[in-house]
Image (cartoon, rainbow, N blue to C red):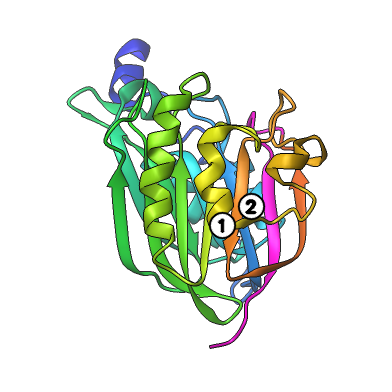
């Protein structure tokens, strides 16, 4: 019976559903309106979605880009953010594959896997693009238009091919950069699986700056690591937007750290 239940439910079952108590009525919190965050949440990992939600709630960003996001996990995270922390987010998904090993579900209908964007403001003009060549696993980007700091901005969220696939990533960056270039004001979140001075990231550096003013391809040694293996793989690229402050926050719930930044977005 236990085996049958595991087959039917899968590795992303809501094992944390009994933890935490709902907030009292009227205890909703506010987000930080000019804060954005990127986080590869790691799937499959034996991690509680209650803990993931608490990690996000501690920062309360306006916009969150998640990579390695299973749809079922994100739905639970949103539920915990609302019930336990009083934070209400809209969501858009950039599913690029359906995978039982990563996201559970039933064998004939495995869970969706890819990117997700959570925003406290509504999102419009969603575009989900799967890269022509994903490398060892399907990859893509998700783009939406939403509000950050009270201004309308185009937000991208991507996850590039795994490391040691430089040529594949170069092709993916070309696809992404061509779309980012169409916008005077854009935020590009994601796990690029490449350190700053790698040649495949050059088209992004030509269009946008990293939120860490010290981090440039020619000064990769000053770029703060964003992974447990002490590499900078995670970025908040800014086009037409200035950073105010940023922080890399190690997390016990993923092999990637949380990267968040507060922004100064010009009016228009």
Q: Going 53% across and 88% down the picture, which residue do you hit?
A: 268
Q: CA distance from mark 2 to mark 1?
A: 8 Å
Please give the residue where the numbered disc 1 appears in the rendered image.
81
Q: Which mark is residue 20?
A: none
Quadrant containing the N terminus in the rendered view: top left
Over which residues does the magenta segment extend? Answer: 252-268
Up-down relation of residue 100 to residue 215 (above or below): above
- Horizontally, residue 76 falls left or right of residue 25, namely left
Front-lying residue, 141 or 51: 141
Res 16 quadrant in image: top right
Q: Is label 2 in contact with label 1 (beta carbons under 8 Å)?
A: yes
Q: Specify whether residue 50 is in view.
A: no
Q: Residue 201: percent from the left, percent from the top?
A: 54, 40
Nearer-N-terminus badge (2/1): 2
Res 86 quadrant in image: bottom right
The answer to if 265 sits in the magenta stretch is: yes
| Residue that sits furthest to the bottom in the current view | 268
Please give the residue where the numbered disc 2 appears in the rendered image.
56
The answer to if 150 sits in the magenta stretch is: no
Q: Going 36% across and 24% down the picture, which residue do you hit?
A: 135
């Amino acid at each position: 019976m236990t085996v049958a239940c595991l087959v039917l439910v899968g590795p992303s079952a809501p094992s944390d559903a009994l933890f935490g108590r709902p907030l009292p009525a009227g205890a909703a919190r506010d987000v930080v309106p000019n804060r954005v965050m990127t986080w590869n949440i790691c799937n499959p990992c034996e991690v509680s979605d209650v803990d993931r939600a608490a990690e996000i709630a501690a920062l309360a960003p306006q916009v969150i880009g998640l990579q390695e996001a299973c749809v079922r996990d994100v739905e639970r995270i949103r539920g915990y953010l609302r019930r336990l922390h009083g934070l209400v987010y809209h969501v858009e998904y950039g599913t690029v594959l359906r995978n039982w090993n990563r996201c559970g579900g039933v064998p004939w209908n495995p869970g969706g896997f890819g990117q997700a964007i959570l925003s406290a403001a509504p999102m419009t003009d969603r575009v989900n693009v799967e890269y022509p060549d994903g490398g060892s696993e399907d990859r893509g980007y998700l783009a939406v238009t939403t509000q950050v700091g009270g201004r309308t901005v185009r937000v991208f969220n991507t996850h590039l091919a795994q490391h040691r696939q430089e040529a594949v990533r170069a092709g993916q960056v070309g696809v992404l950069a061509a779309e980012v270039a169409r916008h005077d004001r854009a935020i590009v979140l994601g796990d690029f699986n490449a350190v700053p001075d790698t040649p495949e990231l050059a088209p992004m550096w030509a269009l946008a700056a990293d939120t860490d003013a010290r981090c440039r391809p020619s000064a990769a040694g000053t770029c703060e690591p964003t992974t447990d293996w002490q590499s900078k793989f995670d970025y908040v690229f800014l086009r037409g937007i200035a950073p105010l402050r940023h922080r890399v926050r190690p997390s016990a719930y993923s092999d990637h750290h949380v990267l968040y930044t507060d922004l100064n977005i010009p009016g228009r």
